[in-house]
Every structure is written in structure tokens, then in C-alpha cells.
Image: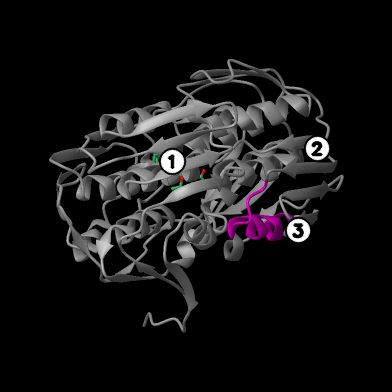
Amino acid sequence: MERFVVAGGARLAGEVQVTGAKNSVLKLMAASLLAEGTTRLTAVPAIYDVPVMASLLETLGCSVGQEPGAVEVTVPAEPGCEAGYDLVRRIRGSIAVLGPLVARCGRAKVALPGGDAIGSRPLDMHIAGLLKLGATVEVEHGYVVATAPRLTGASVWLDFPSVGATENLLMAAVLARGTTTIDNAAREPEIVDLCTMLGQMGAQIGGVGTSTLVVDGVDALRPTAHETVADRIVAGTWAIGAVMTRGDVRVDGGRAEHLEVPLDKLVAAGAQVDVDATGFRVRMEGRPRAVDLVTLPYPGFPTDLQPMFLALDAIAEGTAMATENVFESRWMYVDELRRLGADVRTDVKHAVVRGRERLSGAPVRAHDIRAGAGLVLAALVADGTTELSDAQHIDRGYQGFVESLVRLGADVRRETVPDDTY
Ligand code: EPZ
């Protein structure tokens, strides 16, 4: 088990690099299944989930070359079509092989990833969409089994602009016979990134970046080379850290246009944000002001920055209300924030935070990637030392988190300790 030991009282200052997005690269790796041959991805983050996805693709008959910052996936003429529980349960993103395998092989058997710390995370919209495209879909023995000699274009409406369902149905539709319309589709930059790569592979997709995607199916796609879009959640984490620690951080490679709402909220909290051609800089003097937030699908406030922003409100001047609209149980980490002395009350959808002048260091635990990052930011501004256990969650989404914090002037160290969970 990984543990981070964080000394409070840090001021983050300097420059930090942002590389490709976890929530894009995993889907781009899955999309490579759509074409025989070698697809090369660059700006690939050194995070835990990438080699796990690579292992999953290898179980499907691919060979995957990994080098710093890049991955090459070589897909055979006939990939396997069964994605086993052992790998799928480790990273939910692996459900993204469902669409490509049905489209490419006419059959897919993918383990159900199950729920996690932030919600039950059903797949009903993925399944309903595949049924619309003419697949037969069974859920049996913990697996989704979808078959279709060839999918047929159709109109699909999503009850909620689900990122995962949009991606799976997009990747299913690109090789279907005829035209598919996905209405109320997700519009996240990671979806645009996937559409861009699929377009390079020969796919015909209209309405990219809008909530209506129109896909004219083609008979075959070709491999390609693609650079992964920058990770806006990592970039946002550094921006919030700069404000909480009254610091001055330039986020090199961060795309401010993908973070409009969060950066606006930091300005409302009192920060100065300067955008340049290759990144942005965030500076803060004095104590931040409390700011309300409402999580929504893109371009709304991203749910993945909610724990970090709540940590900011916990030390801000005033009282804030946060509303979580995307996941039904994304407050689990709040008990840990309270251990650091935060004054937070929650109900199902809302959290009310009364900002405190000071937090105090304590032993806390990370329940998931973003909760972990939020607790580290809170620990940076707490009196004394905080020990964050289960910090390996953070490694799933952040490349070199500890090293970057130290480079920005924080006193943080990593310890590998025997797992104490019983
Ligand atoms: C992706 O999850 C991201 N994960 C999440 O990031 C992110 O929080 C989420 O999108 C929203 O932006 C990856 O890309 C690997 P959804 P995903 O389908 O695709 C419900 C992180 O920390 N829903 O948009 O699973 C669902 O339960 C992670 O990096 C259904 O009800 O998200 C949720 O409440 C956490 N039925 C909501 O929709 C479905 O069939 C949004 O889920 C599908 C989804």
C-alpha cells in the first residue's frame, strides 16, 4: 500500500507539466481494436491504468509496445473478444472495449466492472444503445455478452450525456451499416479527442463537440498515430493547489479552454489566471473566498474536480454550497476531510462548507483518485503532518504526483508500507 506523508504549510510555486488525459488514452487504446495493424499513441501518461489496459489488449491478441510517453498497439486480423473480470475490475475504463469488439468481431464478452466509491455506475445506456444498433445483449455470470453479425445504424437517445455510453456507441457505430445518430451525447474534450482519432482512422463522424453525433458507418478503418489530449483534471488540480496554498504555478500544456468554468471559479475566489499559447498561470495572494459549485456534464463544472474544490472551500473565507449532479455517492471522502478539521455537512446531493482559517494534519485514507488528490491539497495547507494511506489510488490518475509537488516546493514523501486493511 502506498502512503503519502505531507507536511503542511506549503506554498506551491513554479512550473508543472501536464501530459495526456487518463480518461482519453484508455479509450484511444480501446479504439485501436477497430483496425488491423499498428496504432501509435503519444502524450501517454505514466499512470497505473495504462499498463493494465495494455494487458487487457494483450489478452485480446494484440501486442502492445510501451515506451516513456507512448504506446503502440498492434491489432491482429481477428482479435479475441473476451475481456476477463480480473483486468476489467481493476479499471472501469476497460469497459470501452465493448463497442469496438462488437463492431470489429461481431461478438464481445466483457466483464461487468461493478460499482466503486463514487456510485453504482450501471451500463444500462451502453446496453440500450447496442440493442438499438441491432445487437443481441445478455448479461450473464457477471458478463455483458453482445453479438451482431454486423451492427446497423439507428437513432439513439441517451437519458444522460454519459461519457462511457457515448464512447462505446460511437466506437460501435463507426463500422455499422448505415447512419447512427447519438442524441444527448457527452461533449467532453476526451470525446472530441476520440472522434478526432476515429476520423484519422477513416471514420465518418459529424457534430463533433456537440450533443448530437452523426456517424456514417464504413466497412473498414485503418490504424493511425495520435497525440492524446492534455489532462484537464490534472491541470485543474494544479490550479486549485496554487490557489489553496496562495502560490504561483504555471501549468505547462494545460488547456485553459477545457477548464473555463473551474478557472472562472478560481477567479471568483480571488485568483489571477493568465492564459498563454502553451498553458496558463495561476496566482493567489491572501485567503481565497468561498465559491459555490454545481457539477454537470461538460462544459459544466467537472465532477472530477469536486473534491479538490471542496478542499479549497474548506479553508476559504465564507460558506459555500456544492451540488453533485453526476454521481450519486461522491461525498465519501468528506469524513476524511472532517478528520483534517473541515466543517462540511452533506445530504444526498449537496455539501455545505463553512470555511475555516486552519486545518490540522491527521491520518486519512484515499477512497479514489480524485478524493486522494483533494486530501493531499487539504494536507498542504493543514498544520502539522498528514499521512494519506491508500495513496496508490492517486497513481491511477496522476503521473509523478509526489515528484511534481516537491518540485513546486512542497514537503511530501511516498512510503510503501504493508497493506493494513483487514
Ligand atoms: C467517465 O466515467 C470518467 N471515467 C469519470 O472519471 C468521470 O467522472 C465521468 O466520466 C464523468 O465525467 C473514465 O473516463 C474512465 P458516465 P463514466 O458514463 O464514463 C450514470 C476519474 O476520476 N450512467 O458519464 O463511467 C453513471 O452511473 C473518473 O477519472 C448510467 O446511469 O461516466 C453516472 O452517475 C471518475 N447508466 C453518470 O451516468 C449508464 O449506462 C455519468 O456516468 C452510464 C452511466
Residue in the picture at 37% in, 51% down: 120
CA neighbours of label 3 inside 10 A, class few (<14), some (14 to 19), many (20+)? some
Q: Does the numbered disc 1 mark a residue whose Cβ is under 8 Å from ligand 1?
A: no
Query: Which quarter of the rendering shows the C terminus?
Result: bottom left
The residue range painted magenta reads 44-58
Q: Does the numbered disc 2 mark a residue whose Cβ is under 8 Å from ligand 1?
A: no
Residue that numbered label 2 is attached to: 35
Mark 3–mark 2 Cα distance, whole angstroms, equals 15 Å
Mark 3–mark 1 Cα distance, whole angstroms, equals 33 Å
Q: Is mark 3 on a helix, strand or loop?
A: helix
Determine the image quadrant of residue 161: top left
Mark 1–mark 2 Cα distance, whole angstroms, equals 34 Å
Residue that numbered label 3 is attached to: 58
Q: Please, is residue 220 above or below residue 378 in the view? A: above
Residue 76, image x, y percentages = 85, 48
Q: Residue 236, which numbered label?
A: 1
Q: In this view, does 132 lie to the left or right of 233?
A: right
